[in-house]
Image (cartoon, helix red, strand yellow):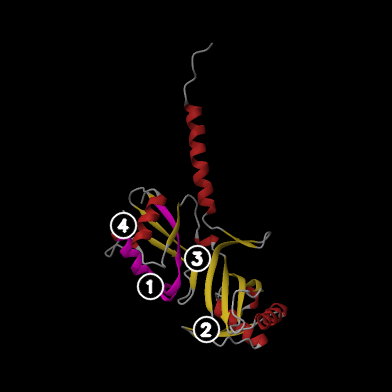
């Protein structure tokens, strides 16, 4: 391995229904079509060195999914991104790439910004449910896991939750509420559908049709600003600083001219 590249990709439109395994297969085909010089694992069954981080649940859209690949030969991150994006199905779009110059990408994915579109729900009703949810100290829900039913608190994971104003361009006979929330990545993970279950528990909010869920951002939660920051920013900053450091080192080694 001579280089690591971190990529940001999306799940849009009907492709939000692809599972994580479906995406893995599509991405590995794209690596072959783009002739990416991948580094491989050791052992009897070598496989491309790809690390996935905190994939969104099947059925949810996302603008902020991340992975890291290891290369056997160096490549320009932007050119590599373009080649991979051309080789992926529309909707699974590779939208950002940086060379990994820092450690711990997964450690910087501590929170997500989600948007939930609730068709058939009046915005005023959604606002009342949000108020009730935020006022509660705990909001317990149940979810079936591979080990059976599990009860856990959703309120503790939710940093912010708001009902956005109604969109004026929608027809009056088509109610639609939009919720925006920031959720910490805890154990067990609290998913958007768990928050909807919590809203149903505290305020009897029950959308008549399945909600459309999209992850807008994912990264490190900044306690001071209350925002979710770009997890690739440290790599970009290190990449910018690297040429400056090299230039300083070169100047320091340059021979001095003849004395005047």
**Mark 2 — residue?**
210
Examine the rendering and report whether any part of residue 12 can be seen. Answer: yes
- Asked if residue 255 is positioned above or below residue 33 in the image, the reply reads above
Residue 120 position in % (x across, y down)? 58, 85
- In terms of image quadrants, where is residue 115? bottom right
Q: In the drawing, what numbered circle is on residue 218?
A: none
Which secondary structure, mark 1? helix
- Between label 2 and label 4, give the one nearer the viewer: 2
- Between label 1 and label 3, give the one nearer the viewer: 3
Residue 183 position in % (x across, y down)? 60, 71
Asked if marks 3 and 2 touch (Cβ < 8 Å), the reply is: no
Identify the residue at image location x=38%, y=61%. Answer: 50
Identify the residue at image location x=66%, y=61%. Answer: 223
Sequence order check, earlier mark of 4 and 3: 4
Sequence order check, earlier mark of 1 and 3: 1
Report the Cα–Cα distance between label 4 and label 3.
23 Å
Report the Cα–Cα distance between label 1 and label 2.
23 Å
Q: Is residue 44 magenta?
A: no
Asked if marks 2 and 4 touch (Cβ < 8 Å), the reply is: no
The overriding secondary structure of the stretch rendered in magenta is helix
Q: In the drawing, what numbered circle is on residue 63?
A: 3
**Mark 1 — residue?**
21
**Mark 4 — residue?**
34
């Amino acid at each position: 391995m001579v280089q690591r590249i971190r990529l940001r990709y999306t799940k849009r439109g009907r492709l939000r229904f692809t599972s994580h395994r479906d995406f893995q297969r599509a991405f590995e085909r794209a690596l072959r079509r783009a002739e990416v010089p991948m580094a491989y694992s050791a052992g009897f069954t070598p496989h491309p060195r790809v690390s996935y981080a905190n994939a969104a649940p099947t059925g949810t859209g996302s603008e902020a999914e991340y992975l890291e690949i290891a290369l056997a030969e160096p490549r320009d991150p932007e050119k590599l991104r373009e080649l991979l994006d051309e080789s992926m199905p529309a909707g699974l779009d590779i939208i950002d790439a940086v060379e990994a110059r820092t450690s711990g990408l997964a450690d910087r994915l501590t929170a997500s910004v989600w948007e939930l579109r609730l068709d058939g729900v009046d915005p005023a009703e959604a606002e009342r449910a949000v108020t009730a949810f935020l006022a509660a100290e705990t909001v317990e829900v149940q979810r079936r896991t591979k080990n059976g039913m599990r009860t856990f608190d959703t309120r503790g994971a939710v940093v912010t939750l708001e009902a956005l104003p109604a969109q004026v361009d929608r027809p009056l006979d088509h109610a639609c509420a939009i919720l925006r929330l920031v959720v910490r990545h805890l154990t067990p993970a609290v998913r958007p559908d768990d928050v909807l279950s919590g809203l149903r528990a505290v305020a009897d909010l029950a959308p008549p049709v399945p909600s459309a869920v999209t992850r807008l951002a994912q990264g490190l939660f900044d306690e001071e600003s209350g925002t979710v920051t770009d997890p690739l920013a440290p790599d970009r900053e290190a990449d910018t600083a690297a040429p400056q450091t090299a230039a300083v080192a070169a100047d320091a080694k340059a021979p001095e001219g003849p004395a005047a």
